[in-house]
Structures are given as structure tokens and as C-alpha cells.
Image (cartoon, rainbow, N blue to C red):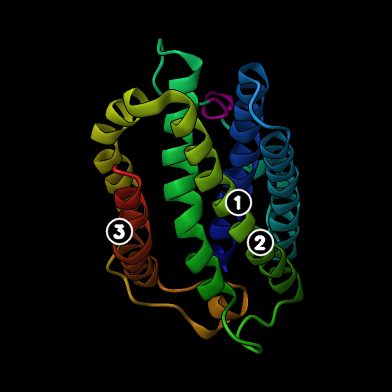
Amino acid sequence: MERVRSTWRRRVAAEYRSAAITAELLHWLIALAVSPDTLDRCHRVVADELAHAELSRAVYLAADGDPAAIPIQRGALRLPHAPGQPLELRALAVAADVFCCGETVAVPLFLALRGEDGEVTQADARAALDRIVRDEATHRAFGWTLLDELLERLGEGGRVWLAPQIPGFVQRICEAYRATEDLCTAEQRAWGLMAPARYSAITEVCVAEVIRPRFAARGL
């Protein structure tokens, strides 16, 4: 059960961090006076990520996890992108990296984690994954919409500035999920885990078939 606990413990921290950095992005977007619809979508993402953190915490506790052992590093709850650059460019980098890469990959990953009916049988894990799957497509759409809105505002200069950074963003998401271990026990699957190698394979397909073509269509 230790792998179950460690996986869901990390997910609590990851979802909480996602809420924090999206809240910071929301502050930037308010300052940039982006469209009201974009602000509403960003606000929804913050609320969703906090809900995901709470649901993940419920799974961790159900697996006899120690609530005091959940690591939340304050230093990780900030956006590090493009320090010293104008806020428009910083937001552009976040949209491309965190959402167009990270949240886009999250869609097929969480679909695979949830799997078919009867695969994930632990009730808390199933409830968490059902909610996350329902939300991730919205988060992905928000990211690409935000990217388009900012590129329209910044014009060719924004595209020229962002384009050289795209390979690094893509490489980082691939490295984050790269693994060769192909083991997942029946008990682990019941708690919503899958073999690390599946993360790697799903990510590579998503990058090749979704992320790279979408960036290319935007001249990136």
C-alpha cells in the first residue's frame, strides 16, 4: 500500500500547487485586463484544482496515510516563468507550458488512470478520478484559448519570443513522465494507479498527435 499512499500524497501536493499557481496567473490576467470570459475560466480552474486536492487527500487518508506527511513546499507555489519580462510575456509562457503542455497531457493520462468501469474499485479513488477527468478537458481548453488571446494581443513579437521556448516546455513534460517500469498490481490498479511506463507512452503519443500539431498550427 505504500505506493498507493505515496502516489496520492504527491497528487495532493500537485493539485494544491496547480491551484496556487493558477491563482497567481489569475492575478496577472486581471492586471492585464483580459476578457471577462477568460477570467471566469481561470477562476474556475483554481476552484477545480482545490477540489481535486481535497478529493486526493480523501483517497490518501482512506489508504491510512498520515495527514501530517503531505509535503507542501511554499517555494513551489509560485510561477517561475520569464522573470523580469513584461507580464504579457510571462502569462504567455505559463499558458504554453503549464496548460498547453501540462493540462493537455493530463487529459489522456487521467482517462487512462480512471479506466473502464470495474477497474478502479476503491470508492474514494473512483470519485476523485471521475471529477478530475470531468474537469481536465476544460482546463486544456482554457490554456489554448488563453494562448490564442495573448498571441492576438502581442502579435508577431509575442510569437517570435515564445517559439524558441516551446521545445523546452515539450521536453520537460516528456521528462516528467519518462519511465520504464511496467508493473502495477491488481490492488494498486483498484486504487487508481497504473504502471509508470504507461504514463510515458501516453505522454509521447499526446505530444506527437496533439501538442506539437497545435503549436505548429499557431506558428510555434
Mark 3 residue type? Arg
From the viewer's perspective, is the residue at label 2 or at label 1 nearer? 1
Against 89, residue 115 (above or below) is below
Residue segment shown in magenta:
74-78
* Disc 1: CA contacts within 10 A as few (<14), some (14-19) or many (>=20): many
x then y, percent, for residue 188: 54, 76
Choose the circle earlier in sequence order: 3 or 2.
2
Q: Name the residue that disc number 2 marks.
A: 132
Q: Secondary structure at mark 3?
A: loop
> From what the image shows, is residue 90 above or below residue 204?
above
Q: Earlier in the sequence, mark 2 or mark 1?
A: 2
Residue ID at (53%, 85%): 186
- Distance of label 3 from label 2 (alpha carbons): 22 Å
- Mark 3 vs 1, N-terminal side: 1
Cα separation, mark 2 vs mark 1, equals 10 Å
Decide which of 55, 94 is in the foreground and name it.
Answer: 94
Q: Position of residue 140 (x, y in %)?
A: 55, 53
Residue marked by disc 1: 139
| Callout in the foreground (3, 1) | 1
Q: Amino acid at mark 2?
A: Ile
